Amino acid sequence: MKTLFRTAGFGLRRTAGPPCGTTRRRPRAALYRRLSIAVVCLAALGGLGSLPAAAQTRGRQAASPHKAGRPTRTHGKKHRPAKTRCAARSRGKKRHGAKARCVTPRHHKKAHPKKPRPKPASGPAHAAAPALASPGAVTTSTYSNGAGSLTYEIYLPTTYRAGTPMPLVVALHGCTQSADVFRQLTGWDKLAQAKGFIVVLPQQSSSNNQFECWNFFQSADMSRGSGEPSLIAGITQWVQQHYTVDTKRTYVSGFSAGGAMTSVMAATYPDVYAAAGIGDGCEYAATATCAGYRSADPTQAGQQAYSAMGSHARVMPVIDFEGDQDNTVPPVNAQQLIQQWQTTDGLVMHSSLPTSPTSSSFGGGLSGQTYTTSTYGDGQGHELIQAWVVHGMSHAWSGGSSSEQFSDPSGPDETASMYAFFTAHPMG
């Protein structure tokens, strides 16, 4: 694109004024003429549609000799071409015996510098404040900050009343999914209506990742105040500020790449999210190898997560779901995720936590998938991690909608189980 525009002459400095008796191109006509060249080049490459409509229109105007020849207007007055005015002045001077001198018309003088546009305010802010959601309806809005923009869906139950705090769940979709598809897969909005909480579903942009995966493996998207974590946290905090939200009961959850990004959010914003729910996801700093193979060393990852918490470090309760037949994010990643969060929580508590589960139970059967639930504690009688292994399940959301991809309707209700864990673990 830059090459095409340079070919058309964009970005070149204007030359000095013309000598007397010559025609000088008006700056705007010259710009339009150059733009028409770029339009023709783009049209030949099939890329005309990528130009703004205004640019296409100006290119067409410049290509028309009738429109290009019209006099320009400056402050509402017509101006003759430079040659005509210069010649007229010369004739007048000769009649009085004076030497002719070419005077550049006023509209060719160096223009006054344009006033600089005001810079947008720094920090998280909406480009345009969205309308507040109505209870009982799914509303789509957009949030922007210095890292970019994300759209998101928000659902308020019909029982929502301003002034009465409600819990908030932020749910992150997986690769190739949309926020709306994930909402229908998981039923987070239906559970929100039944239990009385707000749910927000951010939507990854295809401009950030062509498969619409969250970039949990990119260093720029693994730190507080930068990249995708800043956008997701920004959406969360905007909702907290504009609705009556219980900030001690704000949670984050996700599936697949969204589950891996949930680990990132729990590590980078432990002061925002009270607990995390991860479905078929990965540990913090897992690297992209967790897809199809295994994550990085969980001990090192646990130390990195603790460093990412910084001054906000606190014990992070985590619930994890995994299918033992998952080939997309193999089950070994679930074990590594548990070890990573045990390491991180141990560093926060300045003690080594028991690595063995404090309890295990077996459930399901008959017409549904069987599953094993294991609980890991802090050694002081408090539950920190709850791990669910659904036997026979592949890469799917357990108990999800049968009409959506990546669903195992015969498994235990993952959405309800996560929320039950969340309600048992409010922030401090």
Image (cartoon, grey):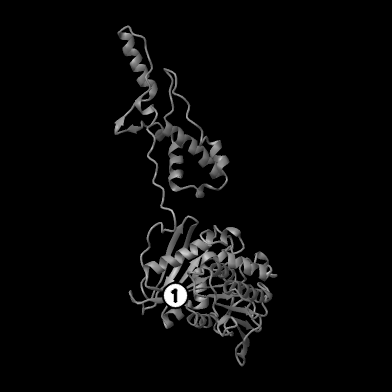
Quadrant of res 289: bottom right
Residue at mark 1: 248
Q: Quadrant of the N terminus?
A: top right
Instruction: Check disc 1: other Cα within 10 Å, few if <14, some if 14-19, many if 20+.
Output: some
What percent of the width, then of the height, locates residue 209?
A: 57, 60
Residue reaching furthest bottom? 366
What percent of the width, then of the height, locates residue 193?
A: 42, 80
Q: Secondary structure at mark 1?
A: strand
Residue reaching furthest top? 97
Residue under the image location 36 percent in, 32 percent down: 72
Could you tell me if residue 291 is visible in this image? Answer: no
Give 265 or 115, whichever is nearer the viewer: 265
Give 41 or 387, whichever is nearer the viewer: 387
Residue under the image location 65 percent in, 72 percent down: 329
Quadrant of res 210: bottom right
Identify which amino acid the numbered label 1 is placed on.
Lys
Give 420 or 2, whichever is nearer the viewer: 420
Give 359 or 371, whichever is nearer the viewer: 359
Residue under the image location 55 percent in, 58 percent down: 208
315 on left or right of 356? left
- Give the answer, above or below, for where 382 lies relative to 33: below
What percent of the width, then of the height, locates residue 158?
A: 36, 78
